[in-house]
Image (cartoon, rainbow, N blue to C red):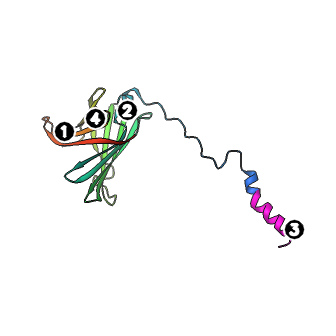
Amino acid sequence: MPNKIRGCVTVLILSPLLLMPAGAGESASVPAAAPPSSKLASLAWLAGSWRTESGGDQLDEMWSAPSADSMFGSFRWMKGGKAWMFEMLTIMDEADGVVLRIKHFDHKGVGWEEKDQAVTFKLVHHDAQTAEFERFRSDKTGKLVYRKPSADELIAEFRTSEGQTEKEFRFRRVGP
């Protein structure tokens, strides 16, 4: 290839690099999280990745740290080494209080509830290691109680309206 053509090719290849702003190509800094509402700040102990086994099944639950008016969580239930169901969970600080919503999905991502519906609970009690949510806006009643007896243990307990435990999952921390 003649030198003149080689020079043009070099300029064509290098010119986009010369036009890049300084620092381009480096990873962008992550913006700081918005400070959580005072109501959600007290639930920060839920944040982390948690795992348990139940009857040979693997269950994973993950919670984000609170930020602004929300926390986000996910849940996965594995049966026989395969995904059986998922949940998307949100805790929101709303005008009428703190609300937990759960949407269920099968292993293919098909929702169990109607698309404009969710299983909804309202925070009725909390302290430094407990959050008690009561189901509302439904013909079904009951409670979902999260407890953190130690830094590496999280218990999720489903109770009847009479306070009887229906299901209890004892998770161990598997990540931050």
Whichever of callouts 3 and 2 sits on the residue coming sooner in the sequence is: 3
Three-letter amino acid code at the position of disc 2: Ala
Which residue is at the far bottom? 1
The numbered dot on residue 4 is 3
Circle 2 — which element? helix
Circle 3 — which element? helix
On screen, 56 above or below 46? below
Q: Main secondary structure of the magenta part?
A: helix
**Mark 3 in CB contact with mark 4 (< 8 angstroms):** no
Whichever of callouts 2 and 4 sits on the residue coming sooner in the sequence is: 2
Three-letter amino acid code at the position of disc 3: Lys
Residue at coordinates 84% horizontally, 69% vertically from top-left?
5
The residue pinned by badge 1 equals 142
Q: How busy is the neighbourhood of tag 2: few (under 14 within 10 Å), some, or many (20 plus)?
A: some
Whichever of callouts 3 and 4 sits on the residue coming sooner in the sequence is: 3
Circle 4 — which element? strand
| Residue 86 vs residue 115, the one in the foreground | 86
Residue at coordinates 35% horizontally, 32% vertically from top-left?
45
Q: Position of residue 62 (x, y in %)?
A: 35, 44
Q: CA distance from mark 1 to mark 2?
A: 24 Å
The residue pinned by badge 2 equals 44
The residue pinned by badge 4 equals 122
Magenta residues (range): 1-14
